[in-house]
Image (cartoon, grey):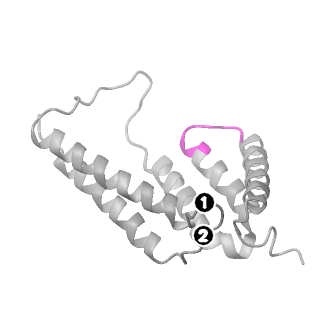
Amino acid sequence: MPRRWWLGAGVVALGAVWLWGARSIVSTTHFIGLGPSAMITAIGAGLVVLGLLLGWQEWHGLAAPVEDEEGAGPFSGRRFALAVAGIALPLVAMAPLGFPITAMGTFALVARAFGSRRLLLDLLIGAVLGVLLWWLFSKLGVHLGKFLPLVR
């Protein structure tokens, strides 16, 4: 079986991107001395550590073999594209559309990528989560932008 060491390298690279992005966030502290970049830095560091562990396991042949799961079909480029679109949507939609609408679209796209066929339900769940999270973050003093920038 070929070694898939490049999977670990990819996870390390993803973690490095998160760490690089955390550097650009203004370091303001609110309650316990942790700024908004703390969680992003922790996730980036965790990805780097896990990627190194995965690469080491693959290099030494210790990683679990890939198993076909029941019902898992072949790779679907359409589903992959939907998931990538869901992940990328906040990059382009957060400022013009606001957090709740962006969360609604992101949730619906990723749910569709995982096989959901209930678009209206997915949009509703995404909207409820977006409104709830926007409200909770605003109560914590974390500014996620305007609620609905298109509505004045």
Asked if labels 2 and 1 touch by Cβ distance under 8 angstroms, the answer is yes
Measured along the vertical axis of the image, is residue 19 above or below residue 108?
Answer: below
What residue is rendered at 72% in x and 49% in y? 126
Q: Which residue is mark 2?
A: 29
Instruction: Tell whether 90 sits left or right of 48.
Output: right
Query: Between residues 132 and 68, which one lies in front from this camera angle?
Result: 132
Q: Is residue 14 above or below residue 25?
A: above
The image position of residue 59, as x and y in percent, is 11, 43
Q: Is residue 115 magenta?
A: yes
How far apart marks 1 and 2 lie (CA) works out to 7 Å
What SS does tag 2 mark?
Answer: loop
The type of residue carrying mark 1 is: Ile
Using residue 68 as the reference point, say whether residue 62 is left or right of it.
Answer: left
Residue in the image at 61% along x and 43% along y: 111
Q: Is residue 144 magenta?
A: no
Farthest-out residue, right? 152
List the residue tagged with mark 1: 32
The N terminus: image quadrant: top left
Q: Residue furthest top?
A: 70
Q: Which residues are magenta?
A: 111-118
The x, y position of residue 93, in whole percent, is: 66, 70
Task: Indicate the amino acid at tag 2.
Answer: Thr
Residue 78 position in % (x across, y down):
49, 50
- For label 1, count other residues whose C-alpha is less than 10 Å away and answer few (under 14), some (14-19) or many (20+): few
At x 58%, y 48%, the residue is 110
Q: Answer few, some or many: residues within 10 Å of disc 2's Cα (few below 14, many 20 plus, some between 14 and 19).
A: few
Give the quarter of the image for residue 32: bottom right
Q: In the image, is 118 to the left or to the right of 36?
A: right
Q: Position of residue 33 (x, y in %)?
A: 57, 64
